[in-house]
Image (cartoon, rainbow, N blue to C red):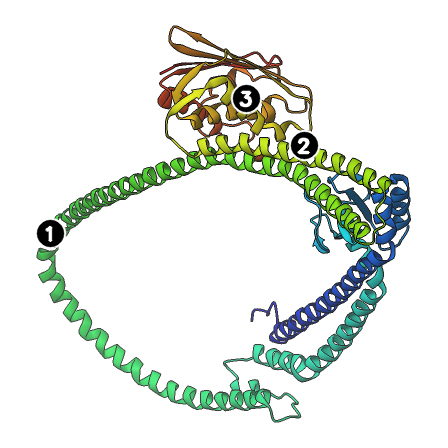
Amino acid sequence: MTKVKTGLSKKLLTRVLSVYFILTLLVTAGQILTEYLNAKSHIKSELQTLKNTFSSSLTRAIWELNNPQAQTIADGLMELPIIEGVQIRDENGQFISNLGRTSPLGEVNTESGVMQDHADGTFGYSFPLIFEFSGRTSNVGDVTLYSSSAVIFGRIEVGVFFLIGNAIIKTAFLVFLFLNAFRQMLTDPLEELTQQISEFDVDRPQSSKLHVRIEDNNELKLLQDSFNLLIDDLISYKEKLKITQDELTDANRRLDDQNIMLEQEVAKKTASLSKIMLDLEQQKDELIVNQRELRQENENRQYIEDELRKRNSELAESMETLQMAKDQLVESERMASLGGLVAGIAHDVNTPLGVGVTAASFLEERIKELQLAYDNKSLTGKTMSSFLAESQQTTSLLLGNLNRASELISSFKQVAVDQTSEAERDVDLKQYIQEVIQSLAPNFKKNKHTITLNCPKELIVRCAPGIIAQIFTNMIMNSLIHGFENKNDGSIVIDISEQQGNVLVKYKDDGKGMSNENITRHFDAFYTTKRGMGGSGLGTHIMYNLVTQALDGQIFASCTPGEGLEYEIRFPIK
């Protein structure tokens, strides 16, 4: 008898213990997670509590431009056990202090207390620094305090070890109880039953009955009694079988005699038919083979036709989907430059407007003080002279910043309207390109790139102005993103002239240029060297289509690696 590789009791015990181990693991993991979350919540509360401790002194230090004192406060915060990093910024988003483990922040200062988790295992609490002066509040910067998972684990380390040790002890004790119970109640009786059943002898069934000591009246006891009853029946059937076999032997002997006589007659009659049957069988086999081959060929042809129809249908749907996707991507790329203008202009306009609001508020306070002195009849010539001097300075500051904001908005307004309109009008090329360059100025604030425009005055072309804005925006942003990568002092030169009724534009930068392989595919759709960094590959493709189709002109690109990229554009004035 083949020996059982894995006993029933082992399988049952394994499954029971497996379920218990999984439950124990889940419960322990849940408890550890709960400890972790509670500790993290306490640390977040402590970070928020720290705001009330040092925000007032740090706010005054930044207001008074006392950066060393702010740095000293940051160093003191880094000495706290729960602090992993500190970031302090002024109202312009510039870092005064950036210590320890930190993460990049947005360009806009925090308006209210925000708790945020980061991918590197840290989490930070950001809140603004509000300074109150003469009943008026002003946001002078923000602070971000960082803590990390390591701090949390340091607090719950003892509790985690206690939970794991408790789970291990309970699991070991339960395993011991289960092993002992299974061995006494199931494993030993089953092994004894299996051993006696394996020694069963067909020739001596009476001696093969089971005799296992089972104290409880359970399923094993019932199995033993049923097996012994089966052996009793087997003994009875064996005796009846012997009698029947003797009778069958005699009948077989008589039948054999009759079969011999019949076989001799059949052999004579079937001999003549054998040859005919063999010929018919051979012809039948050949016919069946031919039918199978014909059926298989028809099925193959039908399958190929169905597959061809299916592939043609899928190809037609794919072409329609691809065309729709391309149109959507082209439209998205056209609107992306407008979105960049909006973000840059909004940031630049915000600064002069903020200064204007501050100046107007100060002037209002000085007028109230003058009115109060006048009502109290305490107004003096010195007070009036001081008010007039301060009023003159404040109004000059207010008008200067409002004029600056007005110029930015006026420049952006025309370019933005043209970007979304396809209506044609007469355009002063030099003035319009200067407006486009001014609308792109926010993108050049953090570097020393220069743009030189050489264009005759009153060079008028008739076209949709948005086309001109899109072409020059794409060329300038392409130089900024690709050509001036890792370079802060790039130079762009734009030479525009009129030649025989055509406008000739020569655009050149001194960036890193492109390889010969890349320049040959420069105007291909979806081709970009910034595939994994947000590049779509449609900017130059759209520019090529605008020049060749909308302006009915020509565009060429050439470069030398390390010496910059050059465009030459030619299109009719009218």
Q: Which element carries disc 2, helix, strand or loop?
A: helix
Q: Which element carries disc 1, helix, strand or loop?
A: helix
Looking at the rendered structure, the kind of residue marked 2 is: Gly
Which of the 4 quarters of the picture holds residue 298?
A: top left
First in sequence, mark 3 or 1: give its number.
Answer: 1
Looking at the rendered structure, the kind of residue marked 1 is: Leu
* Of the two numbered discs 2 and 3 in the rendering, the one whose residue sits closer to the viewer: 2
The residue to which callout 1 is attached is: 280
Instruction: Give the numbered dot on residue 434.
Output: 3
Q: How many marks?
A: 3
Q: Is residue 143 left or right of residue 513?
A: right
Q: Is residue 173 left or right of residue 504?
A: right
> Residue 500: x percent and y percent?
38, 6
Which of the 4 quarters of the picture holds residue 169?
A: bottom right
> Residue 185: x percent and y percent?
67, 84
Q: Nearer the viewer, residue 422 or 234?
A: 422
